[in-house]
Image (cartoon, grey):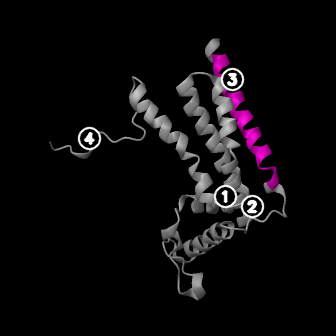
């Protein structure tokens, strides 16, 4: 009975994090918000160019053929392509790169809260502390500045992975089951010795 209550409490906490993410992303619903400012135009253009190159060539491109007056430009070499492919995947559903960009931003914000909750719940073994730290993490001023002012998709998407790194290190050094999330054991690398 207690395990069922704890699972329900965690589910409720995840729903709370989704609600907090929705509240924090309300400005994204405004069609007048300038997603083209600062880095926003780069990410939308990269997604559009990458999608166009995929449709033309059928492969995942490092050089986007249609950029720079059809000479091609290797924009995907300078920025990580994970966020671009997430925008493209969402665009397959909504057929609008701006909406896809905004949904990718929402997804990155909510996942950063989920992963912080997962790490803090393992570290503190307290659901309330984990929930509070996740909400604080989602509402950090720099996190929201990257989201609304700088449109730095790569940076606020990276906020998802920071708790995962600490969660992996915590599991590596402080748990008895030794789940290797972020470390490679030396015998995996050198199996012949």
Numbered disc 2: secondary structure? helix
User: Label 2, on which residue?
Assistant: 99
Asked whether the beta carbons under mark 4 and mark 1 sit within 8 Å of each other, the answer is: no
Give the distance between the C-alpha atoms of the residues marked 3 and 2, in whole angstroms: 32 Å
Mark found first going from the N terminus, 2 or 1: 1
Q: Position of residue 81 (x, y in %)?
A: 53, 62
Q: Which segment is the magenta one? A: 4-27
Mark found first going from the N terminus, 4 or 2: 2
Q: Position of residue 162 (x, y in %)?
A: 53, 44
User: Label 4, on which residue?
Assistant: 186
Mark found first going from the N terminus, 4 or 1: 1
Residue 150, quarter of the rendered image: bottom right
Side of 27 relative to 76 (left or right): right
Callout 3 crowding tier (Cα within 10 Å): few <14, some 14–19, many ≥20: few
Give the distance between the C-alpha atoms of the residues marked 4 and 1, in whole angstroms: 39 Å
| Residue at image location 40% in from the left, 25% down from the top | 177
Query: Is residue 22 shown above or below 67?
Result: above
| Residue at image location 52% in from the left, 72% down from the top | 58
| Image quadrant in which the C terminus is located | top left
Dominant secondary structure of the residues highlighted in magenta in the image:
helix
Mark found first going from the N terminus, 4 or 3: 3
Query: Is residue 106 shown above or below 20?
Result: below
Asked whether the beta carbons under mark 2 and mark 1 sit within 8 Å of each other, the answer is: yes
User: Label 1, on which residue?
Assistant: 90
């Amino acid at each position: 009975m207690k395990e069922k209550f704890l699972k329900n409490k965690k589910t409720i906490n995840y729903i709370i994090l989704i609600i907090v993410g929705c509240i924090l992303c309300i400005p994204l619903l405004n069609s007048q918000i300038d997603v083209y400012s600062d880095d926003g135009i780069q990410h939308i253009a990269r997604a559009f160019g990458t999608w166009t190159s995929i449709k033309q060539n059928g492969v995942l491109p490092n050089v986007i053929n249609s950029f720079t007056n059809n000479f091609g430009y290797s924009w995907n070499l300078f920025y990580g392509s994970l966020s671009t492919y997430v925008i493209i995947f969402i665009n397959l559903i909504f057929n609008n790169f701006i909406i896809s960009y905004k949904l990718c931003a929402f997804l990155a914000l909510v996942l950063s809260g989920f992963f912080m909750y997962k790490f803090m719940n393992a570290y503190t073994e307290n659901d309330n502390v984990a929930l509070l730290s996740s909400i604080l993490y989602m509402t950090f001023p720099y996190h929201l500045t990257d989201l609304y002012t700088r449109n730095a998709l790569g940076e606020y998407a990276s906020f998802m992975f920071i708790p995962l790194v600490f969660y992996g290190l915590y599991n590596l050094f402080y748990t008895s089951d030794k789940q290797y999330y972020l470390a490679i054991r030396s015998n995996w690398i050198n199996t012949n010795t």
